[in-house]
Image (cartoon, rainbow, N blue to C red):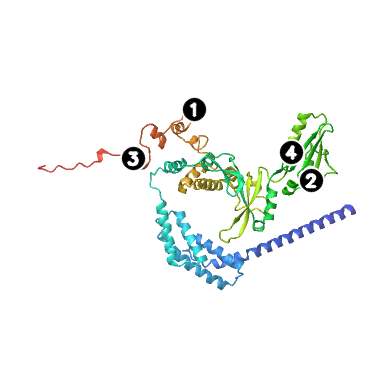
Amino acid sequence: MSPKKSKKAKKSSKRRAKGKAKKRKAKKKVEEIIAKVREPELLVEEVLKKVPEDVPAKLREIIREKLIHIVVSEKITDLKVLKSLLNEYIIKAREIIEISDLAREVLSEKIYEGLFTTLFDKSIELNIDKDEMVRIRDDVIRTYMESLVEPGEPVGTVAAQSIGEPGTQMTLRTFHYAGVRELNVTLGLPRLIELVDARRTPETPMMEIHLSEEYRYDREKAVEIARRVEMTKLENVVESVDIDLIALQLIIRLDPDMLSDKGLTREDIVKTLSKSKTLSGRIKQDSDDPHVIIIDLPKGYDVIKAQKFRDRILKTKLKGIKDIKKVIPQKRRDPETGKGYYVLITDGSNLGAVLKVDGVDPTKTRTNSIHEIENVLGIEAAREALIREIMNTLKEQGLDVDIRHVMLVADIMTWSGTVRQVGRHGVAGEKPSVLARAAFEVTVKHLFDASARGEVDYIRGVTENVIIGQLAPVGTAMVMLEMNPTKLKVQPQIKGE
């Protein structure tokens, strides 16, 4: 091997050795950080070895969380203190298990589990005594028993009646949004129809954007977020647009008041327009007038082409979020503290993009578009939104409908994993019974399609049994009584009768 090659080999081996040493050092540092982070956990695990077997796993987990919180937040690391706290928790846990045990036979497993875990958690947090816990247990049992449905109860028919009957009293108008004169909102029967029809976009899409603590109390900061959210097109900040066919130019005069309101400058607009390939190198700023932009038209343009070019340019998005046409800051008052704060009411909705904006509180921000909620937050959130929106629509009309009926409708619309409408393209159109589908809408089409596919109707539902004149399988008609004459005992005849 030549001296040059041997030098290179030595250098590369040194580099490899340095690299390995760095990796070892980094790995050691990571392990140290992990060990430090795990210190409270390991300390608590040591204490939890004393927990007896009769304490359920759910309560054991709550005890573990509370002890870790005490170690981390209150910096208590003395084993004696932690063991003393553990003994208190164990006594409390046994007391709660004893109180809850009477409810085990009555409540379902999940509700029973929720009862004793919540009782344990709140009894430590709020120092609830034994009598209060007994009252809470009795209230839970009473509420549960009152909520049960009798076997054979036609819950679907009852829910349909409970929502449909008061629904006939709903109005058909579109109202102004409360406190905001610029916005209209669909309420009443049209809103209920678009909810159960699972329309892709609402007639009047809107959002209620809540702000984080830093922005919600200051109007200027709220307006700053509103400017970032509101979609501003060139046509929103233009005073006039002239077409000069002789010079082949588009002369755009900007409105200074609108520029100030939207937080834009002429330079911002020129920069945005310049990003377009068709406009690159064609934009000039008028040196005499600070509010004029001149755009050179392509050669050979006539009046019609120039007009189309002008309309296309005016639709250019300058800033903001797509589909958010208008944003209005609205002042509200916190009923608990009495402190004023701002929320943003929007005309238009784009939940996914709004939640990414700095200063927006993602836990409180709402939209009235169910499909957007489903796409961004998932099907469970869409179900909750359906329940909330339907209940708000009914309450706004002064109609009192039990929430359980609305929950049943929302469950039927969402159980498949997507939001489906109640109509023939959704829930009603997917019923297994041919006669039930045919009874709803487009009767002949359903019967033809079913015969072509050779479908069989087993006549198990309410609708199809009513059609053919049988008793529907609800209530007492669910019970099938059978008699075997061979097993009947014959009463012996008594002489003299």
- Sequence order check: which comes first, mark 4 or mark 2? 2
Mark 3 residue type: Met
- Sequence order check: which comes first, mark 3 or mark 1? 1
- Sequence order check: which comes first, mark 4 or mark 1? 4
Which residue does the numbered mark 1 point to in the structure image? Answer: 445
Which residue does the numbered mark 3 point to in the structure image? Answer: 480
x and y, in percent, of residue 174 in the image = 56, 41
Indicate which label's residue lies in the foreground, 4 or 1: 4
Question: Is residue 111 found left or right of 259 in the rendered image?
Answer: left
Residue 266: assigned label? 2
Mark 4 touches mark 2? (CB < 8 Å): no
The reply to whether residue 56 is in sight is no
Which residue does the numbered mark 4 point to in the structure image? Answer: 314
- Sequence order check: which comes first, mark 2 or mark 1? 2
Instruction: Measure the C-alpha gap from mark 3 to mark 1.
Output: 35 Å
Mark 4 residue type: Leu
- Sequence order check: which comes first, mark 2 or mark 3? 2
Disc 3 crowd, CA 10 A, few/some/many (<14, 14-19, 20+): few
